[in-house]
Amino acid sequence: MYNIAVLPGDGIGPEVIREGIKVLIRVGEKFGHKFSFQEASIGGHALDTAGKPLPEKTLELCKNSDAVLLGAVGGPQWDNNPPDLKPEKGLLGIRKELGLFANLRPATLYSSLIQASSLKHELLDGVDILVIRELTGGLYFGSPRGFHQKDGEQVAVNTLSYSESEVRRIAKVAFEAARKRKRKVCSVDKANVLETSQLWRRVVTDVGKSYPDVELSHMYVDNCAMQLIRNPKQFDVIVTENMFGDILSDEAAMLTGSIGMLPSASLGGKVGLYEPVHGSAPDIAGQGKANPIAAIASVAMMLKYSFNLEQEAQSISEAIEEALRQGYRTADIFSSDGKLVKTSEMGDLIAKNI
Ligand code: IPM
Ligand code: MG
């Protein structure tokens, strides 16, 4: 029996998570596993129902589960909340509390979706990038932070800070991951300007000495943003700090046709957390327009990384691929020769393909 904490969150979170669970139940039937689901609130939903973005009850449930499945957080109704009462604080809080420093975001192109990307086909065929984003340090968490008054005006401060041990452990994750892939790590930083990046580069280089079979390169983040568009096939594993990883993973998502395709796994603690890379997309929430594939693929990552169920995970990837090959498309990846389906229909189709 696998106990899964389910945090649907806001916007399209609940509707895509529903499809993830649908597929997981199907996998359970097919392969003879039992999954139990316990739901809790996070983000804006938690603010509205419990007055805080990460209630203790939610955190307790997650800590006592075998894995966490999360939808998305945020929405315009909470945009003007004070910093500690923003939905996003719930997400950052749970990542930190569970010690999830390693965020894996695979941008893999399904060949039948090649026309959904805004780039030329020949640049994309075979794109398979794993962005490894440091998730509990850097600009998102550094102190001091906040607003203060100076010389009669308001000033805001955030701090970018990394310790050697923080860089070392994420670098190891990247090299280990590369060993199971094409054995290439590109470490992305801004070492021509930032001291944190100079330390980052030094430590990653040092860790790399223990992985002589993995080719290590370094790239400035601005160049990386360009190279991802110019020649994405040069990349295998990209490892980078929290905020650079946030930005570059959205960019990498578009290589695959839509941000609605990108799953993620957040690892490093006792309990792994799995969430689509996309946000809560409040503008399309509740209309059946959301693409559930990122959430469903996140479930596949859960099977692989938290439960060691490789074959089961593979069955989900194949079921997704099959649905796409059959021509089914949600609105974000639709083109005139496809069959437009709603969120729940896409979930049904993928479940049926298991
Ligand atoms: C992501 C999201 C989050 C982040 C937001 C919602 C806080 O953009 O997971 O990429 O910036 O980490
Ligand atoms: Mg993001």
Image (cartoon, grey):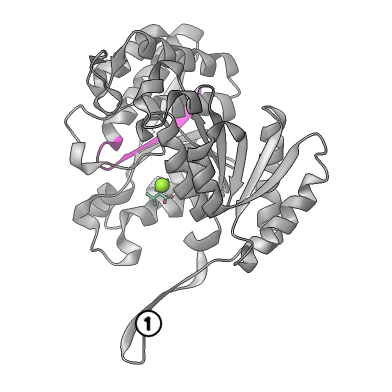
- x and y percent of residue 338 in the render? 27, 14
Above or below 152: residue 314 = above
Residue in front for this viewpoint, 110 or 117: 117
Residue in front for this viewpoint, 208 or 50: 208
- x and y percent of residue 58 in the render? 39, 46
Residue in front for this viewpoint, 93 or 113: 113
Category of crowding for the residue at label 1, using alpha-carbon neighbours closer than 10 angstroms: few (below 14), some (14–19), many (at least 20):
few
In this figure, which residue is indicated by the disc labeled 1?
A: 148
Q: Is residue 96 visible?
A: no
Above or below 118: residue 205 = below
In the image, 316: left or right of 43?
right
Residues in magenta? 1-13
Task: Say what amino acid the circle numbered 1 marks.
Answer: His
- x and y percent of residue 103 in the render? 54, 42
In the image, 249: left or right of 175?
left
- x and y percent of residue 104 in the render? 55, 38
Q: Tell me the residue at 33%/26% (across/down).
A: 292
Q: Tell me the residue at 50%/43% (across/down).
A: 63
Q: Is residue 314 visible?
A: yes
In the image, 343: left or right of 304?
left
Look at the numbered disc 1 and give the secondary structure of its residue: strand
The quadrant of the image that shows the C terminus is top left
